[in-house]
């Protein structure tokens, strides 16, 4: 029953076009029908074939294809109503096969030829489905090649461009409109040749060579050096049904790496070839350098020895100079002392005012020279270590009292007020050297203060006592504070132009403080004043040295008239000056060059001296103290001077 129904339905139902296409995969019966020359094609016209072809190729390409077919056969173009010849049908099949495939094209044409057995709507449906599949496949293919880093171009059998990707256009910078479907590849080759893409040479020859390569349908591969310096690898492969696929790969970086590798290999080879020679040369050079270094080290050692010796000699010479100045201080000051004695004696005599002024000027100049030499000698003694501090514990009160008394007169002469604050603190230091420091502070304060006052006081700071001297002078700029303790340094200030001095007092002060281990400090406010200070350690009151009361004697009570003064000095000029000076004071001077001469003069005059003035340095081994000890038995009723 089932078989009967199957045969009945097959006999009276018409087969669809889809069924025929599926059956063609197993039985190809349509190709024989189309190729049969005796086959009757019914009423199929040229217009039917053109209409079918337009569904796939478009109007323009269809008209161009049919016109070209007629021209190849040297016939006039057929009219739409003309009956289609077998050759025309076969030509149409080939056109459709290029779009929808040979099998589908054959079935479609066979279905049209059997128009009575199928509906034309089926033909249209199949054609639309084939067109959609074709568009999808083309879109998929285009998306694929667009995502490839290589440039790709595809030409058909007629050497016309049919496909490409964006990288191809970007790589060769083609102008807009040049790359399009159907463009003959010859025009693209000519454009490239005109832009020196193929190197130097005749453009037509270069184009012809590349067209011949494509027409040979043989695979090819080569590298091209482009005008911009990049290198492109070109690979061409023919397609089975005709046409050519060409890929373009930018291998510039690979070439650079390859060149670098070749260069490195060449350098390595050269290095290996000359390594032994270079090692020998370097070894020889190092040996030479080592010898030179040994020589240089030897010379340097000799130079260092000479420098050390020269430095030692220079230091010894400097120390010898300093010691000489320290030891020769007596001899250097003796002539100045004598000159000042003479000027003092001369000033006591009666002269007119102009002569007195000259004498005072002379005495001032001698005094300045004496102060300068004394200061230089003091610095030399300090540098030579000739001064040995005598550290004791003593009350600072007596020193402050004496200093205030001593400098009150100087301050009064300038119209300045000198104030001081007493202190009962006991300090530990050298009395004479500490007094010298404070003297320099007070002397500078009075010297550089034009109006106002000077203050001498103390402040306790823990286990130390700070002695301060304040003034209301012009002050010192902050950037100049470090220079005040340098030798021969005076702060550049217009208000100091009238102040005499060589800038050595504070240099001596700094050296004395350093020797005693005392810290000195200066603070200043320009336009308001300056304060100099020295910090002294506190001493033990139980060990404080008691101050002896002065024994003024009867001489001061009755004056100097008729007082016998014995003067002992080994410098005749000093004796002459003292004789003139003491004579001007109404004294009776007795002068002697030595102790023996002094005893002889006293014996001749049969007198005893009231005062003995003896120079400390009488000769290299004999001092004034020794002379006083020797002369002490000459008087019995008077206290020892």
Image: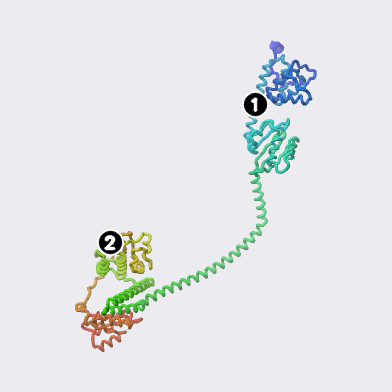
Image colouring: rainbow
Task: Identify the residue at image location x=73%, y=22%.
Answer: 106
| 205 in relation to 501, above or below | above
Residue 543 location, x and y as percent? Answer: 26, 68
Q: CA distance from mark 1 to mark 2?
A: 109 Å
Q: Which picture quadrant has residue 542? A: bottom left
Q: Nearer the viewer, mark 1 or mark 2?
A: 1
Task: Identify the residue at image location x=21%, y=77%.
Answer: 556
Give the total of numbered labels.
2
Residue neighbourhood size for the residue with mark 2, other residues' Cα within 10 Å, grouped as few (<14), some (14–19), many (≥20): few
Q: Which residue is more in the foreground, 458 or 621?
A: 458
In the displayed image of the protein, which residue is found farthest to the bottom? Answer: 604
Q: Which picture quadrant has residue 6? A: top right
Circle 2 sits in a helix, a strand or a loop, which is it?
A: strand
Q: Which picture quadrant has residue 540? A: bottom left
Q: Quadrant of the N terminus?
A: top right
| 252 in relation to 601, above or below | above
Residue 115 location, x and y as percent? Answer: 72, 15
Circle 1 sits in a helix, a strand or a loop, which is it?
A: helix
Specify the label residue 375 is tagged with.
none
Residue 181 as seen in the image, left or right of residue 562: right
Q: Quadrant of the C terminus?
A: bottom left
| 177 in relation to 74, above or below | below
| 89 in relation to 164, above or below | above
Q: Which residue is more in the foreground, 523 or 34?
A: 523
**Which mark is first along the chain, 2 or 1?**
1
Q: Which residue is mark 2?
A: 459
Residue 98 location, x and y as percent? Answer: 71, 26
Specify the label residue 135 is tagged with.
1
Residue 289 location, x and y as percent? Answer: 59, 64
Residue 542 visible in the current orientation: no
Residue 388 visible in the current orientation: yes
């Amino acid at each position: 029953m089932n078989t009967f129904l199957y045969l009945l339905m097959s006999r009276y139902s018409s087969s669809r076009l889809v069924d025929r296409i599926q059956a063609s995969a197993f039985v190809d019966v349509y190709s024989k029908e189309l190729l049969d020359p005796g086959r009757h094609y019914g009423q199929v016209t040229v217009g039917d074939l053109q209409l079918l072809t337009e569904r796939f190729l478009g109007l323009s390409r269809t008209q161009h294809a049919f016109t070209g077919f007629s021209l190849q056969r040297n016939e006039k173009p057929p009219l739409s109503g003309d009956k289609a010849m077998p050759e025309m049908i076969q030509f149409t099949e080939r056109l459709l096969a290029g779009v929808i495939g040979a099998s589908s094209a054959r079935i479609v044409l066979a279905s049209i030829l059997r128009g009575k057995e199928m509906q034309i709507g089926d033909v249209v449906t199949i054609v639309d489905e084939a067109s959609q599949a074709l568009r999808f496949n083309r879109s998929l293919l285009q998306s694929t090649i667009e995502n490839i880093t290589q440039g790709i171009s595809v030409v058909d059998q007629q050497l016309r461009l049919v496909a490409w990707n964006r990288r191809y256009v970007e790589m060769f910078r083609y102008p807009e409109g040049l790359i399009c479907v159907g463009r003959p590849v010859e025009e693209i080759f000519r454009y490239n040749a005109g832009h020196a893409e193929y190197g130097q040479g005749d453009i037509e020859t270069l184009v012809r060579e590349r067209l011949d390569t494509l027409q040979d349908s043989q695979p090819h591969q080569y590298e091209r050096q482009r005008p911009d310096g990049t290198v492109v690898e070109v690979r061409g492969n023919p397609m089975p049904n005709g046409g050519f696929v060409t890929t373009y790969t930018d291998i510039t970086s690979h070439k650079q790496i390859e060149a670098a590798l070749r260069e490195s290999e060449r350098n390595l080879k050269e290095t290996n070839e000359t390594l032994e020679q270079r090692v020998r040369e370097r070894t020889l050079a190092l040996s030479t350098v080592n010898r030179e270094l040994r020589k240089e080290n030897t010379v340097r050692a000799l130079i260092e020895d000479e420098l050390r010796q020269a430095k030692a000699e220079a230091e010894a010479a400097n120390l010898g100079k300093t010691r000489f100045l320290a030891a020769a201080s007596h001899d250097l000051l003796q002539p100045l002392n004598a000159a000042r004695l003479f000027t003092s004696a001369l000033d006591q005599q009666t002269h007119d005012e102009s002569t007195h002024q000259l004498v005072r000027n002379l005495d001032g100049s001698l005094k300045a020279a004496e102060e300068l030499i004394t200061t230089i000698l003091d610095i030399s003694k300090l540098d030579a270590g000739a001064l040995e501090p005598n550290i004791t514990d003593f009350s600072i009160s007596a020193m402050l009292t004496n200093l205030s008394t001593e400098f009150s007169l100087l301050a009064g002469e300038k119209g300045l007020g000198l104030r001081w604050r007493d202190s009962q603190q006991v300090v530990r230091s050298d009395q004479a050297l500490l007094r010298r420091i404070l003297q320099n502070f007070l002397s500078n304060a009075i010297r550089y203060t034009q109006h106002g006052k000077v203050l001498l006081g103390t402040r306790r700071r823990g286990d130390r006592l700070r002695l301060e001297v304040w003034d209301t002078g012009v002050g010192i700029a902050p950037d100049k504070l470090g220079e005040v303790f340098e030798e021969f340094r005076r702060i550049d200030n217009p208000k100091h132009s009238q102040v005499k001095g060589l800038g050595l007092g504070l240099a001596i002060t700094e050296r004395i403080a350093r020797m005693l281990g005392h810290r000195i400090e200066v603070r200043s406010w320009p336009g308001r004043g300056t304060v100099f200070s020295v910090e002294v350690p506190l001493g033990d009151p139980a060990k404080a040295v008691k101050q002896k009361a002065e024994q003024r004697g009867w001489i001061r009570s009755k004056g100097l008239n008729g007082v016998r003064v014995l003067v002992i000095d080994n410098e005749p000029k000093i004796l002459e000056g003292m004789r003139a000076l003491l004579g001007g004071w109404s004294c009776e001077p007795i002068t002697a060059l030595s102790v023996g001469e002094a005893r002889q003069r006293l014996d001749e005059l049969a007198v005893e001296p009231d005062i003995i003035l003896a120079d400390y340095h009488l000769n290299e081994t004999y001092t004034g103290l020794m002379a006083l000890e020797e002369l002490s038995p000459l008087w019995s009723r008077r206290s020892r001077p």
